[in-house]
Amino acid sequence: MAQGNEGRPKILIVDDDPTIIELLDDRLSAAGFKIVAAFDAIQAVAVAHKEGPDLVILDVMLPGGSAFTVLERLRTASPTALIPVIAVSGLGADEIVERLPRDQVEAADEQIAHFAQKPLDFDDLIAKIHEILAG
Amino acid sequence: MTYRAKLIIAICAVSVLTLAALMINRMLLVEEILFERAQTRLVSAGGVFSREIIDDLVQDRIERVRDALGFLASQKRISLALIYDQNGIVRSASDERFVGLPVPYHDGQQRLGDEQVLIQSFPLLDHDVSFGTLQLALSLEQMHRDLVVLFIWSAVLSVLMLVFIIGVSWKLSGRLLKPLEAMRQAAEGIARGDFSREILVQSQDVIGALGRSFNHMAHELDDMTRHLQERIDEATAKLAAANALLTEKKQELERGNRRLVELDRMKTEFLSIVSHDLRNPLTAVIGLADSMQRMPLSEEKRMHYLDMIKSEGVRMTDIIEAYLDITKIESGGIRLLKKLTDVAKLCADSVRAIKMTSGVHVELDFPESMPTVKVDPDRMRQVIVNIVDNAIKVSPPTGHVTVSGKALPDAVQISVEDEGPGISPEERDRIFEKYYRSEDRHNVYKGRGLGLAIARGIIEMHGGKIWAEEGNNGGARMVLSLPRTEA
């Protein structure tokens, strides 16, 4: 298990909605995680490189490029290539798949550790994060 | 066989018969004349000779009689001369074989040896005393030869005549049949659909009448055909028009069908987008309420959470309002309540209604007297608030947003200029599309991009236009143009 500087797992939250970020920050901090945040796709990649998070919670619909462009950029650079990603969206997984080209669907399946649909159940989410970080 | 040939043959037949009849008549006539002439000659010769010979008979000079008979028989055409007595016994003859024998011939035409002769008897009388009878035979061969020559000449003349008749008939029939031939050719022309031929006829006879009838018929046919062609053209044109209409209707149906399919797709898309957009604030509201229940929070934090729950609720309401608005605009369900409105005042009111959350300064720049326009003030305020709100959001925290007005001859323009990053030329039209989501990270027209789609819908319902352009200092300028109404 990769660990952050202070022994607490670091989680990068990418969402364009500040309320969601604040809420996730409050809940996940309380659950013992260190939180960093980004509001759009480009910022997300930059923060990931700078902070080296243990896990990314990624909103699928972002300004400045979709979650899949973020995923691609994370996977193609060696420091961020192996960071597990939890995708979050107001759309269901099926609806997202419908909007994707076929070759991207398989890539997304491999590269996304978990898919969470809004409205989020925070207890489930925290449990899932622990599970993923435990390997 | 051509009609002309038949005609010529008929004329020939009639000519031959006529010529033959004429020839026969002539031959008979000439034969009769020649025969009478021969008879006259024979009678005169017999009479003269009887008187010459009677003295020798009376004196019984037999030798002289015989010589005289021989002389007579040597005369041209006289074949035989003999004298017989009352008992019919030949006494003397130019041919000695007959002497002493009964008279061999009677008067009239006879064959003598191989020649045709005319035989005539003359009584030899001296003072009523008979000295026998003189019998002469006149050869008719010459007459027959003459007749043959005459026949040949007549035949030659007849043949020449026939040739002449045929020639004249050929010429004449050609001339007489010419209109008929022309009619035949014209009829063939008509059969091929050529009605232009006119037959030249001058004669007043039946052929002339036929020619004129023919011309009339051709004219009528031409007329009829032309009308027929016109009718066909007319019907074809109508058919083409009907076909075009059908094609148009079909295309219309296809367009309608595509539109329906598109609408169906949009409806599905709409539902998924609504549910998606509501899930964000729902996540916040549920999550915040859940945190308040289960987490130890400071009083300050609890108040903050409650504020957020309230504003997320407002956001959900806004989202629902926006969807209802766009749906109404698209279905034409919005009714405008137009009033004569002071645009400058409307803009000032709109700006005042915006809750200022940053240090952006909004300036109003309107000339002293702006013409009033006839608009729905509530809807127009909604548009201006939306655009100014967007301008504030993209501007830097201490930037300026300028709302200005301009009166043009036929329109009133309201411009909202910001100091934000501007909008790329490719996106200037697209930002007004429903659900358009900019890839630009600085673009605030995110949410669902419904704000500008609604703004455009409302402005267009007023007969106006809305567009984006580059501002003076790199930002964006949104321009609303509303048609001026005559006061």
Image (cartoon, grey):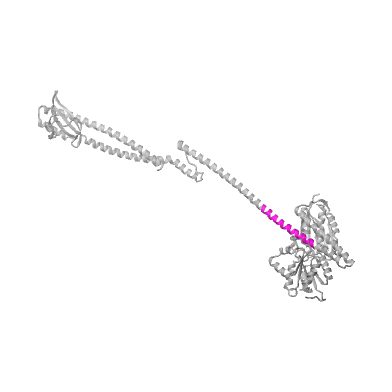
- Identify the residue at the far top of this view: B128
Tell me which secondary structure the magenta stretch mostly adopts.
helix
Tell me where residue A14 sits by quadrant. Answer: bottom right
- Residue at the image point whose x is 69% and y is 66% from the top: A102
Residue drawn where x is 70% and y is 56% of the image: B261
Confirm whether the magenta stretch covers residue B262: yes
The answer to which of B33 and B83 lies nearer the viewer is: B83
Q: Is residue B3 magenta?
A: no
- The x and y percentages for residue B399 are 83, 65
Q: Is residue B460 above or below residue A67?
A: above
Residue B459 shows in this picture: no
Q: How many marks?
A: 0
Q: Residue at x 82, y 71 (%)?
A: A35
Q: Position of residue B55 (x, y in %)?
A: 12, 27
Compared with B249, A15 (above or below) is: below
Expressed as whole percent of the image width and height from the top left, the position of residue A3 reads 79, 76
Nearest the eye: B268 or B452:
B268
Is B176 situated left or right of B104 in this image?
A: right
Residue B16 vs residue A50: left or right?
Answer: left
Horizontal side, residue B229 vs residue B370: left or right: left
Q: Quadrant of residue B389?
A: bottom right
- Residue sitting at the far right: B299
- Quadrant into which the N terminus of chain B falls: top left
- Give coordinates of residue A50: x percent, y percent: 78, 74
Would you say residue B305 is visible in this rendering? Answer: yes
First to last magenta residue range? B253-279
Q: Is residue A40 above or below residue B407?
A: below
